[in-house]
Image (cartoon, rainbow, N blue to C red):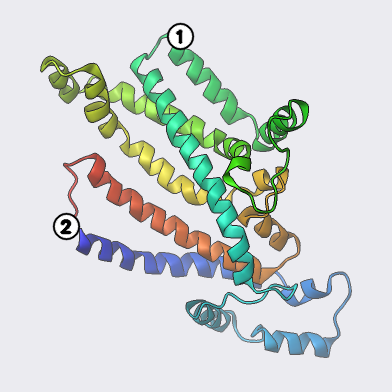
């Protein structure tokens, strides 16, 4: 197992370099960060040249990237155009989005897998049809429509929750935004679980366990569910990074100052250090989540061994 983890970590290095260089290239080569500092006003050529030299923007792009990566390994992600360190923005944004992601993942796992198991065990019946129709509706409706609708009903019309989230963003205020963020992924988890359960329910090992007289609950939880969760775990693992980076719409609706909000502000203002810094951390989250998923395979299926 240890050799496998080391090998996977080494494989992450070229993926990390390639993805971060691509982001760096798109942000710095396709835009002008110095012009973004001055807005609509044209900068003085001498001033612009001095700023480019101070920001290391007068060097070739590959040298800029090497300089940036050297700063990252020293814990310096640069300075945003408002004078605030990018690490300070990360320190305030990532904990909020992490709590929101935890709420969304928990809802996605508990509700999605439960509905998938119930639907898969009753394939072709009215419960199965209802779940399929419901998940199709959830997938079809855009997130901003669902978000504003639930915000109006639960926050404004009925007053059950706060329509917006306070700056501290405690878990109690993140339940409704977590539901909005998790809905589409929840629908996919439900469908994946349902399909996997329905296929494995006819497998030989399930019939053997049933023939031995094992209780149905044990057959489902110990045998059927564990083998059926592998594609679901794969989806959830890749969805962790997607939820953290794709929460822009949800965070805008509920006024949550997290990663999505900072990325939106950075893109809107062409704030290159903020965008590149936040995306770099999200790349690391994606890579670590995929490694964790691969390790969970061996837990779910004892036949899987890593050398």
Judging depth in this view, the residue of 85 and 198 nearest the camera is 85
Image quadrant where one finds the C terminus? bottom left
Mark yes or no: residue 99 visible: yes
Above or below for 161 versus 305: above
Mark yes or no: residue 30 visible: no
Above or below for 121 versus 20: above
Residue 126's disc number = 1
Above or below for 173 versus 62: above
Could you say where residue 125 lies in the image, as x and y percent from the top left?
Answer: 41, 9
Query: Residue furthest toward the right?
Result: 41
Q: Quadrant of residue 65?
A: bottom right
Could you say where residue 168 lies in the image, as x and y percent from the top left?
Answer: 65, 53
Residue sitting at x 27%, y 45%: 297
Q: CA distance from mark 2 to mark 1?
A: 46 Å
Is 286 placed left or right of 95 in the picture?
Answer: left
Residue 307's disc number = 2
Residue sitting at x 48%, y 41%: 105
Query: Residue furthest toward the left?
Result: 212
Query: Residue furthest toward the top?
Result: 126
Q: Quadrant of residue 15?
A: bottom left
> Within 10 Å of the Cα at label 2, are there few (<14), some (14-19), or many (20+) other Cα atoms?
few
* SS of the residue under disc 1: helix
Residue 168's disc number = none
Is 301 placed left or right of 288 in the picture?
Answer: left
Q: Count of labels shown?
A: 2
Could you say where residue 73 lies in the image, as x and y percent from the top left?
Answer: 47, 78
Is 4 placed left or right of 13 in the picture?
Answer: left
* SS of the residue under disc 2: loop
Residue sitting at x 12%, y 15%: 211
Judging depth in this view, the residue of 216 and 66 nearest the camera is 216
Q: Quadrant of residue 126?
A: top left
């Amino acid at each position: 197992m240890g050799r496998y983890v080391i090998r996977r970590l080494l494989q992450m290095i070229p993926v990390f370099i390639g993805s971060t260089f691509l982001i760096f290239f798109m942000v710095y080569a396709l835009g002008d960060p110095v012009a973004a500092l001055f807005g609509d006003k044209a900068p003085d050529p001498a001033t612009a040249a001095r700023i480019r030299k101070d920001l290391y923007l007068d060097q070739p792009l590959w040298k800029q990237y090497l300089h940036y990566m050297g700063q990252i390994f020293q814990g310096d992600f640069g300075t945003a155009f408002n004078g605030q360190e990018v690490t300070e923005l990360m320190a305030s944004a990532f904990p909020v989005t992490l709590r929101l992601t935890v709420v969304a993942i928990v809802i996605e796992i508990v509700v999605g897998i439960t509905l998938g198991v119930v639907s898969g065990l009753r394939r072709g019946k009215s419960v199965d049809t209802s779940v399929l129709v419901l998940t199709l509706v959830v997938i079809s409706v855009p997130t901003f429509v669902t978000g504003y609708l639930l915000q109006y009903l639960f926050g404004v019309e009925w007053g059950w929750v706060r329509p917006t989230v306070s700056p501290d963003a405690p878990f109690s205020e993140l339940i409704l935004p977590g539901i909005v963020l998790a809905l589409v992924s929840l629908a996919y988890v439900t469908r994946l679980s349902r399909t996997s359960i329905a296929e494995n329910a006819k497998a030989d090992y399930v019939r053997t366990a049933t023939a031995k007289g094992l209780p149905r609950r044990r057959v489902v939880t110990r045998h059927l569910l564990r083998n059926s969760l592998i594609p679901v775990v794969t989806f959830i693992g890749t969805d962790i990074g997607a939820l953290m980076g794709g929460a822009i719409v949800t965070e805008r609706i509920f006024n949550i100052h997290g990663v999505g909000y900072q990325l939106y502000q950075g893109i809107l203002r062409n704030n290159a250090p903020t965008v590149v810094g936040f995306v770099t951390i999200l790349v690391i989250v994606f890579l670590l989540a995929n490694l964790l998923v691969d390790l969970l395979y061996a837990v779910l299926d004892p036949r899987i061994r890593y050398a």
